[in-house]
Image: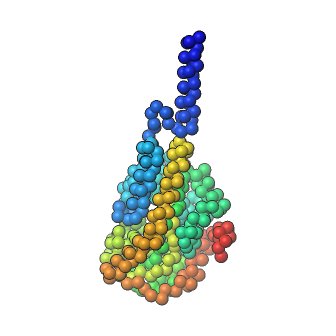
Amino acid sequence: MKGLKNFSAMVAVFMVLFLAIAFYGTPAFGQQKYLLKFNHVLGPKEPYHAGFQKWAKAVEERTKGGLKIEVFPSAQLGVEEDILEQIRAGANVGQNTDSARMGNYVPGIACMNGPYFAETIGEVEKLKKMPTVKGWLDELANKYGFKVLSFGWVQGYRHFFTNKQVRTPEDLKGLRIRTPPAPIWQESVRALGATPVAMAFGEMYPALQQKVVDGVELVYNNIPAGRFYEVIKYVSETRHIMLVNFEVISAKWFNALPPNYQKILVEECDKAGMETSKLIIDKLEKEVKEDLIKRGMIVVDKVDLPAFRKAGEKAYEALKIADVKAKVFKELGKK
């Protein structure tokens, strides 16, 4: 009888352990460790890098070391397109990217990086609840293997930085402007009046120096980090794109995490993203702008924003996603 009781007790213990593994993904007597290697193209002094480190610290603390994130700035793990392919293959890597590149898989989602789409952080937050956007994210995960942890990372407003004063779309005619290698970026720059030149982030400085391109369209915080003020004179505040970034990892790898780790990873990513975004928009953009003026850059006055807004519509038409934009705007209650 005693042996039967001991056997029953052992069975009960193993059942508890089995349920713990099934729910949490880790045995109660030895916590399994998970590692995410997160890559981004920005420099270690950019606010995003500090934001990613804050995210990593919060995740490690809340999981008691069970899930660790290593952050790699300056594309140390490789170029963005290569990392995205590794993600699709199920590797434990992540990438800071954008809807423009995600649009190579789900075309409609590219409109989120189109001209004058989301224009405030509040609108970005609302987009998370829109049915069409949720559908895009599900398709990215289920069909292409991309788990979007958050798109609550706003890098600021993109402007034109050139060596010629630009006030209207006509002023961009004939200027070669660097863009990332994705259709929505190229069509946006073309619609706004310039000739797009696809080029990696790290190639911009020498290209400007050697006059391979006549300018770039970036957010303010990119300029001091890349020392572009040394080769660019003017900034035209067109605010043509609010740069919404996506934090992407492998859906396969994410689904293999314990459920509580999944929840923590998403929550802390979104939290760090919104904190970083508000810091950039409310404080850092203004400080960087003032510093660039001190360094000799000139902010062009009287930029014709209505003309740029009107011109930007051609990008959506060229990519045949104007109806998609209209659908999301209707869900947002935006005209």
Query: Hey, which quadrant is residue 124 in on the image?
Result: bottom right
Q: Is residue 56 above or below residue 309?
A: above
Question: Which quarter of the rendered picture does the N terminus lie within?
Answer: top right
Of residues 257 and 84, the one nearer the viewer is: 257
Determine whether, in the image, residue 69 is placed left or right of residue 328. Answer: left
* Picture residue at 35% right of the left edge, 68% below the top: 225
Q: Residue at x 54, y 25 (%)?
A: 13
Residue extending farthest bottom: 302
Find residue 58 and report its horizontal and vertical position in percent: 44, 52
Q: Position of residue 118 (x, y in %)?
A: 56, 71
**Scheme by which the image is coloured:** rainbow
Looking at the image, residue 48 lies above or below residue 303: above
Q: Along the horizontal axis of the image, is 254 left or right of 206? A: right
Q: Which of the 4 image quadrants contains residue 115?
A: bottom right
Residue at the image point whose x is 45% and y is 85% from the top: 166
Q: Position of residue 57 (x, y in %)?
A: 41, 52
Q: Residue at x 49, y 33 (%)?
A: 28
Outermost top residue: 1
Observer-nearest of 240 and 19 = 19
121 vs 241, nearest the viewer: 121
The percent coordinates of residue 54 (x first, y second) are 42, 56
User: In which quadrant of the rendered image does the C terminus lie?
Assistant: bottom right
Q: Is residue 9 left or right of residue 91?
A: right
